[in-house]
Image: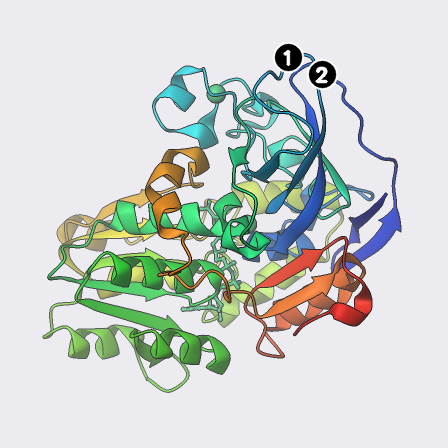
Amino acid sequence: MRAVVWHGKKDVRVEQVPDPVISDPADAIIRVTSTNICGSDLHLYEPLGAFMAQGDVLGHESMGVVEEVGAGVTNLSPGDRVVVPFQICCGTCWMCEHGLQSQCETTQVRAQGTGAALFGYSELYGSIPGGQAEYLRVPQAQYTHIPVPDGPPDERFVYLSDVLPTAWQAVAYADPEPEGTLLVLGLGPIGDMACRIALERGVRQVIGVDRVDARLDRARTRGVTTVDMREVDDVGDAVRELTGGRGADAVVDAVGMEAHGSPLVKASHKAVSLLPDALAKPLMTNVGVDRLAAFYTAIDTVRRGGTVSLSGVYGGMADPMPMMTLFDKQVQIRMGQANVKRWVPEIMPLLTDADPLGVDDFATHRLPLEAAPDAYATFQAKEDGMVKVVLKPGMDARDAVA
Ligand SMILES: NC(=O)c1ccc[n+]([C@@H]2O[C@H](COP(=O)([O-])OP(=O)(O)OC[C@H]3O[C@@H](n4cnc5c(N)ncnc54)[C@H](O)[C@@H]3O)[C@@H](O)[C@H]2O)c1
Ligand SMILES: [Zn+2]
Ligand SMILES: [Zn+2]
């Protein structure tokens, strides 16, 4: 089959790889009909490259049609239409039963000290082949799937794999009062969707910050008050001005470790990405190559007693944390990989023809799988108005829409 394969930093290729096969009774194979590129893939594309191996298949936001099921999977049959959550989870362990599926005790990658195994997400998360491919092997398939009805287009449902539950959890963890203010840092797919969810849930004031015109425009047209970080001296001051001097009740950080805004750290980060893997890995996990610019902004902009909800992914541990400010401001911080299956029952009723969250036209680019290498480069550069790419393995290149 054809698949998007990682070869090195900023080097992904579409290649022929062996078809996946059922290797455990709990597996299923799906034929992928839609598979997105995510901001998290950009971390593998460059800074987390040390954890990837040549030949790894990327992708964790897929949906499709069941082709084949293992003997142990009794609730799926060939022909069923399913979305595949980005994390592999069993449904019966303590964590899954408590709605913490991204910590599943059956699939935790204990050798790396990390949570549930993820599709296409490096040795840190189990080296599981990803879904940017024609076919995907789904382990723990009895629970690692979301059944969706036939009829509506893929894009009605494909964001259940990641964007929707991640943005939903970001807002749920931020827990803004309806009369309050939610500040969202970063208006990529996750931040944009978090704004839409907060507005849909009736939060009075939603403020979004970014530095890319197309992303600011998209949010503004849906009722978000936007702050262009290129145009203000200090994001904190701009937010305080919009919030009666007090700051935002709750802040979602939808940026993560590839934030723009700390040039010094950027230099060290670049230096590490040039090192051989053996040297780069401990630096990424243990030493200060973090890029905490967005997190620092979150701490500065949240009001005293407010909540910071991190959905952006961070690595490393040595950047200084402003503990005194966090303690003095009485800030609550919540974070983590989204527990996909936990939020699906709350989100599903919004995926209707009325489309209150605007999922049907959320993608800016619909492209054949073969276009992945260019799409990764354009998405990383945030060019061509690209906010969300859906790759369609079955698409003829002549039908691409961008
Ligand atoms: N927690 C989870 O389960 C989960 C799931 C999916 C994605 N993520 C993470 O969420 C983050 C966002 O994902 P995405 O797909 O929207 O990515 P993205 O890279 O498209 O979006 C990030 C946005 O942040 C903006 N930005 C950069 N620096 C900024 C700053 N200092 N202040 C404000 N905005 C800034 C960028 O211009 C960009 O629009 C990534 O870190 C991704 O890994 C987490
Ligand atoms: Zn994703
Ligand atoms: Zn589990």
Kindly check if marks 1 and 2 are in contact, taking CB atoms under 8 A apart as contact: yes
Amino acid type of the residue that numbered disc 1 sits on in the rendered structure = Gly
Depth order, front residue of 9/271: 9
Looking at the image, can residue 297 be seen?
no
Neighbour tally class for label 2: few under 14, some 14-19, many 20 plus, Cα within 10 Å? some
The count of marks equals 2
Quarter that holds the C terminus: bottom right
Q: Is residue 339 left or right of residue 60?
A: left
Marks 1, 2: nearer the viewer = 1
Q: Is residue 1 left or right of residue 298?
A: right
Q: Percent position (x, y) of residue 3?
A: 80, 47
- Residue depicted at x 48% and y 24%: 104
Above or below, 157 relative to 128: below
Above or below, 75 relative to 160: above
Quickly name the residue at label 1. Answer: 72
Quarter that holds the N terminus: top right
Image-quadrant location for residue 150: top right
SS under mark 2: loop
Q: Percent position (x, y) of residue 116?
A: 53, 29
Quickly name the residue at label 2. Answer: 24
Mark 1 C-beta to ligand 3 under 8 Å = no
Image-quadrant location for residue 74: top right
Q: Earlier in the sequence, mark 1 or mark 2?
A: 2
Amino acid type of the residue that numbered disc 2 sits on in the rendered structure = Asp
Looking at the image, can residue 339 be seen?
yes
- Residue depicted at x 34% and y 63%: 196
